[in-house]
Amino acid sequence: MAESSITSSGTGTEAAARVADVLLLFTGGPEYLGVSTISRQLGISKAVVYRILQSLVSRDVLATDPGVTGYRLGPAAVALGASALRRFDARSAAAPVLRRLRDETGETTTLSGLVGDERVYLEQFESRAEIKMTVDIGTRFPLHAGSSGKAILAQLPAWRRDAVLSGELSSLTDRTVTDRALLAEQLEAIAADGVAVSLGERQSGAGSVAAALVTPDGEVQGAISVCGPEYRFTPEKIERYRHLVRDATTEIIRNWTNGPSGAHAG
């Protein structure tokens, strides 16, 4: 069947999926995306991509700028994102704990959410040190690199973890582990310990210690981490942070499951 419009090409579900796929491309990569790039990445015709983009622009979900080729997220998308963050219960439950953890460690603390087979930074409380690590809120990262990603991946069901390991395992730094057998061994150890440690695996010169956020029914929601310059992550500090992040995840899950009365937005 020829592709003719957003609503008439295939089923309504397929059309909605295409719109969602287009929008998800804007959560990572360059700020501006053009018709050809989107068409190539999603494997759908330029005509259909163009109609989707025009529909989203008309609703202020996407926007264009004079003199710039391509589309960017518009004010409606920003409003939706802000609303989602406000309503994300884990963020509210985690905020006071992460703020205290930042003060206890002197390092930046973060909250990541699981999105498909990737993770996204949802919140951070920056270190007050002059030299510190900061993260990009809303940017997607693979699960196989870095402590937060590995902490999440280690707690996922075996079938889902195997699916990630069977896919592309790109090297983000020269320390990123891409050997599937070695990575599987590391994940098994992380699952048993409950904590993941990264020294330059996702970002050169960065150290981090993370633990997954797992609800009482076993659903993996994301992870929290303590992160900073690698040279400050000595074996003694790493061991201390391991205990702190374990305790912090327990408190966050307790706040979360207790509902609004147990969590306070930050």
Image (cartoon, grey):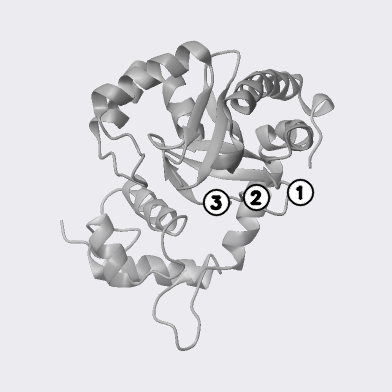
Crowding at mark 1 (Cα within 10 Å: few <14, some 14-19, many 20+): few
Compute the Cα span from label 2 to label 3: 19 Å
Q: Amino acid at mark 3?
A: Gly
**Residue sitting at x 25%, y 69%:** 46
Classify residue 8 as left or right of residue 139.
Answer: left
Task: Find disc 3 in the rendering and name its residue.
Answer: 138
Residue corresponding to mark 2: 132
How crowded is the residue under tag 3: few (<14 C-alpha within 10 Å), some, or many (20+)?
some
**Circle 1 residue:** 128
- Is residue 142 shown above or below 75? above
257 over 266 or under it: above or below: above
Most distant residue in the bottom direction: 67
Which element is circle 1 on? loop
| Label 2 SS | loop
Three-letter residue code for mark 2: Lys
x, y (%) of residue 210? Answer: 56, 29
The part of the image, by quadrant, that contains residue 215 is top right
> Which residue is drawn at the image coordinates 31% and 71% (left, top)?
35
| Disc sitting over residue 259 in the figure | none
